[in-house]
Each structure stands twice: as structure tokens, then as C-alpha cells.
Image (cartoon, helix red, strand yellow):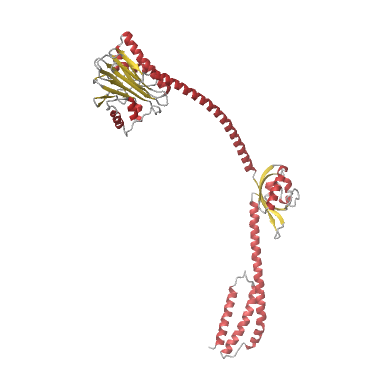
């Protein structure tokens, strides 16, 4: 096959493909006239190619009569086809652009119709002459769009309340001059005469030369929000006023409370001084017996109390007590306690009532009086009577803890006796314990406040610390306090009270009762 024949056959196949493509073209894109303009030049080109194929194949050309006409008409029809196709393409582009523009306008119209306010375009003048307003202006201002357009019935500038006009105009001018959006909040008067608060955001529109063409923006009703803010501001101001007034009242109350507290502190200090005057001397020596006491008070009036006294020539009495609670009421009970023992001593000396010589009986009587008076207080108390002629201790313990510790000859002994505090139960009974004492000894009593400051992880460890304090033969109460780290000038969470009873060896001559303070 010659190359020419091959090219003619290939051209014929291409023309056939063109026919098929023309048939399959979208009717919406290329109409019937354009299709005919496609078929005519393709038909002419097909005739020329078939004639060439037959001639190259050695077959008599049946189409030779038409070949000359086809060659003459092919080029004009081809140019006509190109022009028609290009024209139809431009029409389709325009039609598509119009459809897109129409859809955009529809979307924009729907959007502006549903906005909660009014979109606008206006001149930049004090009347704000509107060239376009959306349908939202009716609900916002009470005017139809046509009434505001070109100020047909009302100029928008006249709707702004007179007090806000200058401020609004100034805000618009500043936004335009800086070429920035302006945001304003002001009041308007509607067609019905109602006053509304509105919020506006707009911007200046400029041409390519920078000349201002118009203003465009959006205005919406914010009356409810502004009224809510105003109500909130008024409420806040009212609260601030109440707070200021309340602050003044509180300051006055604080001043009165501070004055009352100062008075109470003065009274409490005076009460503490009176209470301390009821205590025995810090060091009291009666015959061969030496009584030494220390009281480390808490921040409150003390509920601890100690006392020692001579009953007769052969008996000495002493006790340590801890009233429940703190403050004035507990301190008052210690005064009653002092009075109770004073009466018992007077009854013994004036009426021969030996109750004061029997610790168990005396504590039972004290319990009955506290229960009868119903003071709401109970007392832990250790009361002992020393028989000096036999060096014997008779004692009873009404719930007082820690138990007293007796030291002699380098050894320690705990004087245990259990019972409930006085003032708790009507039928309480108290054990009478009698103990013959060594020739030389030290007996140490303390209140439970000591347990709060002693080192040690548990109660037993704390008690062991106490038992170690009396091993030194040169027993001294101040030295014990120093060893325990107790500063007599500091305050403690609870009262801490010590009472020591010491008997020294006889010096061969009788000692009368001597009381002095160190």
C-alpha cells in the first residue's frame, strides 16, 4: 500500500469519527443549525477522500464528477462552520454568565430579605439619602423602602434623634476619611413615634480614582440588648450602693466589736490576775515538805488549778484539778473549787468535821454539789492528804490523768487509781488509797496539757519521757521545764500545770510552817 493511499484511508476514518462525534454532541450546547454546518464540510471532505482512495486503488472514480465541486465548496463551508461554532460558543458563555448572575441575585435578595435589619446604600450627606434599602427597613423604621429611597417621604438622617445626630455624623466621617468600617450605636424615631436603639456598621465605597461613591452598610435593632445593659448597669449601681452602705455598717460593727473585744480582753486579763492570786505561792515549805507549782496558761482563762494547805499539825492537804473547757466558765468553777476546799477546812477546824481528811468522801461530796448546781462542767482532780507523823499519803483520784509519778532512790513509781471525774454521774464513788512514803521522795503531778507538747509518737512514749525527769537527785521543777522545752513566756494550746511534793531528810530540828515565793 502506497503512503498516499494510507493517508487517504486514515483521513476517511477521521471524517467518519467526526460524523459520530457530531451525532453525540449535547443538543443544549450545539443546536441543529450548527450540527448541519458540521455535516456539510465533513460530507464534502468525505467525497474528496473516497475519490482519492478509489483512484489510488486503480478503480474508476465514480465520484470524479463530484470531486471538483466538493473541492470548490469545502473551504467556504469550512470557514462558515468555524464562524458559526465560535458564535455559538460565545452565546453559550453569555447564557451561562447570565444564569450565574441571576442565581447570585436571587441568593442576595433572599439573604437581605431575611436579615434582622436593613441593608442600605446611600450618599454621604447628613440626610443619608438612600439609593437602595432592603425590605427590613419596614420593621426597623416603620417606612417602606420606597418611602426612604431618595428621601421620598422621610430622610433617614431625620429619623436619628437630634441628640445623637452630630455624634453619628462624626463617626461616619472618621470612618470614611480613614477608609475603615464605622460602627455606631444610636437612637432613631420610627414612623409610629417609638424610640429604638440601633447598631450600624458601614463602609465608604470608592472608585478607582479614590473618589467616594456612596456608603453601604447594615443597620439592626438592638433596643432589647441596650435596655438589658441599662437595667444591668442600674442593678449593678444599686448593688454597689448597697455594698458601700453595708461596708459602712460593717466597719461600724467592726469598730464596736473591736472595742468589745478589747474590753473582754481587759476583763479576761483582770480575771486571770484574780485567778492567779487564788493560787498558792510558787514555793511553799511546810515542815519537811516542800510544795512547788508552775502554771503555764493558754490563751484563755485557765481551767487548771492547784493548791496546798496545812490542815492541822499532823496533816497537809494538796490537790491538782482540771476543769473541762476553757474561758470564763471554767475559771469560775476553779473559784468554786477553792471555796469548796476552804469551807471543808473551816468545817474541820471549827466543827471537827473530818471530811477533809478523807479524800474519797470529800470528792463524793464535791460530785454531789456539782450535780446539784448543774453547771454543765466536770472536773478531773487528784486530792491527797499527807500524815506527817507517819509519812503516809492517803489519796483519791477522780479521773485525773496522767497519773502522778513518785521518785525515790533513783526509781520511779506511778500512783494508779481510776475513777470518773466529779460532776458527771450522781452515783460516783472514789477509791481511798493509802501509801507509806519513803523517807526522802519527790511526787510530781501534772495536768493533761503536758501530753500535747511532749515528744513521742504515742502515749506510752510520752509517759516514759516524764518518768525520766525525776532520776536526778538534784530535782528542780524549772530544770524539768527546760529539759522539756517549755518556755514559761509562751502560750500553749492547753493549760499546763505542775505540782511537785518533796520531802527532804530531817536536819535534826523541827521546822515550823514557812511560806515564801521564789
Residue nearest the viewer, comparing 231 with 191:
231
Residue nearest the viewer, comparing 12 with 323:
323
Quadrant showing the C terminus:
top left
Q: In the rendered image, which quarter is residue 396 located in?
A: top left
Q: Which residue is drawn at 36% across and 14% down?
A: 342
Q: In the rendered image, which quarter is residue 441 located in?
A: top left
- Looking at the image, residue 87 sits to the left or right of residue 284; the answer is right
From this view, report whether residue 325 is shown above or below residue 362.
below
Q: Position of residue 235 (x, y in %)?
A: 60, 36
Q: Where is residue 1 in the image (x, y as percent from the top left)?
A: 53, 88
Q: Is residue 183 in view?
A: yes
Q: Which residue is drawn at 64% across and 45% down?
A: 222
Number of numbered labels in the structure image: 0
Q: Is residue 134 in view?
A: no
From this view, report whether residue 66 is shown above or below residue 448.
below
From this view, report whether residue 204 is shown above or below residue 13.
above
Q: Where is residue 467 in the image (x, y as percent from the top left)?
A: 28, 28
Q: In the rendered image, which quarter is residue 375 located in?
A: top left
Q: Where is residue 291 in the image (x, y as percent from the top left)?
A: 32, 20
- Looking at the image, residue 299 sits to the left or right of residue 97; the answer is left
Residue nearest the viewer, comparing 309 with 44:
309
Q: Residue at x 53, y 28 (%)?
A: 254
Residue furthest out toward the right: 152
Amino acid at each position: 500500500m502506497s503512503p498516499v493511499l494510507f493517508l487517504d484511508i486514515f483521513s476517511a476514518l477521521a471524517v467518519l469519527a467526526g460524523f459520530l462525534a457530531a451525532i453525540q454532541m449535547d443538543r443544549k450546547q450545539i443546536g441543529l443549525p450548527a450540527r448541519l454546518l458540521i455535516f456539510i464540510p465533513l460530507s464534502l471532505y468525505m467525497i474528496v477522500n473516497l475519490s482519492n482512495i478509489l483512484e489510488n486503488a486503480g478503480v474508476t472514480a465514480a465520484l470524479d464528477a463530484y470531486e471538483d465541486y466538493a473541492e470548490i465548496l469545502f473551504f467556504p463551508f469550512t470557514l462558515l462552520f468555524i464562524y458559526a461554532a465560535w458564535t455559538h460558543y460565545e452565546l453559550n458563555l453569555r447564557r451561562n454568565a447570565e444564569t450565574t448572575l441571576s442565581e447570585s441575585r436571587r441568593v442576595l435578595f433572599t439573604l437581605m430579605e431575611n436579615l434582622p435589619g436593613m441593608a442600605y446604600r446611600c450618599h454621604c450627606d447628613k440626610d443619608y439619602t438612600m439609593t437602595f434599602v432592603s425590605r427590613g427597613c419596614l420593621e426597623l423604621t416603620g417606612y417602606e423602602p420606597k418611602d426612604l429611597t431618595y428621601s421620598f417621604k422621610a430622610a433617614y438622617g431625620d429619623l436619628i434623634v437630634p441628640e445623637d445626630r452630630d455624634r453619628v455624623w462624626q463617626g461616619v466621617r472618621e470612618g470614611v476619611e480613614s477608609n475603615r468600617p464605622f460602627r455606631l450605636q444610636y437612637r432613631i424615631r420610627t414612623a409610629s413615634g417609638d424610640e429604638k436603639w440601633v447598631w450600624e456598621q458601614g463602609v465608604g465605597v470608592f472608585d478607582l480614582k479614590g473618589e467616594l461613591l456612596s456608603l453601604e452598610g447594615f443597620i439592626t435593632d438592638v433596643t432589647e440588648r441596650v435596655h438589658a445593659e441599662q437595667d444591668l448597669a442600674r442593678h449593678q449601681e444599686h448593688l454597689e450602693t448597697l455594698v458601700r452602705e453595708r461596708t459602712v455598717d460593717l466597719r461600724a460593727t467592726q469598730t464596736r466589736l473591736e472595742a468589745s473585744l478589747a474590753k473582754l480582753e481587759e476583763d479576761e486579763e483582770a480575771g486571770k490576775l484574780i485567778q492567779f492570786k487564788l493560787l498558792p505561792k510558787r514555793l511553799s515549805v511546810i515542815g519537811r515538805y516542800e510544795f512547788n507549782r508552775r502554771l503555764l496558761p493558754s490563751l484563755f482563762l485557765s481551767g487548771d488549778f492547784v493548791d496546798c494547805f496545812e490542815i492541822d499539825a499532823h496533816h497537809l492537804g494538796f490537790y491538782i484539778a482540771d476543769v473541762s473547757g476553757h474561758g470564763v466558765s471554767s475559771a469560775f468553777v476553779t473559784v468554786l473549787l477553792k471555796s469548796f476546799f476552804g469551807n471543808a477546812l473551816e468545817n474541820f477546824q471549827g466543827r471537827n468535821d473530818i471530811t477533809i481528811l478523807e479524800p474519797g468522801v470529800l470528792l463524793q461530796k464535791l460530785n454531789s454539789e456539782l450535780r446539784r448546781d448543774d453547771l454543765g462542767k466536770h472536773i478531773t482532780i487528784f486530792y491527797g492528804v499527807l500524815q506527817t507523823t507517819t509519812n503516809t499519803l492517803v489519796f483519791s483520784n477522780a479521773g485525773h490523768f496522767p497519773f502522778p509519778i513518785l521518785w525515790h532512790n533513783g526509781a520511779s513509781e506511778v500512783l494508779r487509781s481510776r475513777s470518773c471525774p466529779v460532776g458527771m454521774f450522781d452515783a460516783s464513788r472514789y477509791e481511798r488509797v493509802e501509801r507509806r512514803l519513803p523517807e526522802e521522795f519527790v511526787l510530781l503531778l501534772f495536768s493533761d496539757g503536758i501530753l500535747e507538747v511532749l515528744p513521742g509518737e504515742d502515749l506510752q512514749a510520752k509517759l516514759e519521757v516524764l518518768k525520766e525527769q525525776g532520776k536526778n537527785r538534784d530535782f528542780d521543777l524549772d530544770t524539768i521545764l527546760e529539759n522539756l522545752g517549755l518556755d514559761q513566756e509562751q502560750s500553749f494550746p492547753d493549760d499546763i500545770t505542775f505540782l511537785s511534793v518533796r520531802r527532804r531528810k530531817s536536819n535534826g530540828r523541827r521546822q515550823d510552817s514557812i511560806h515564801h515565793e521564789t
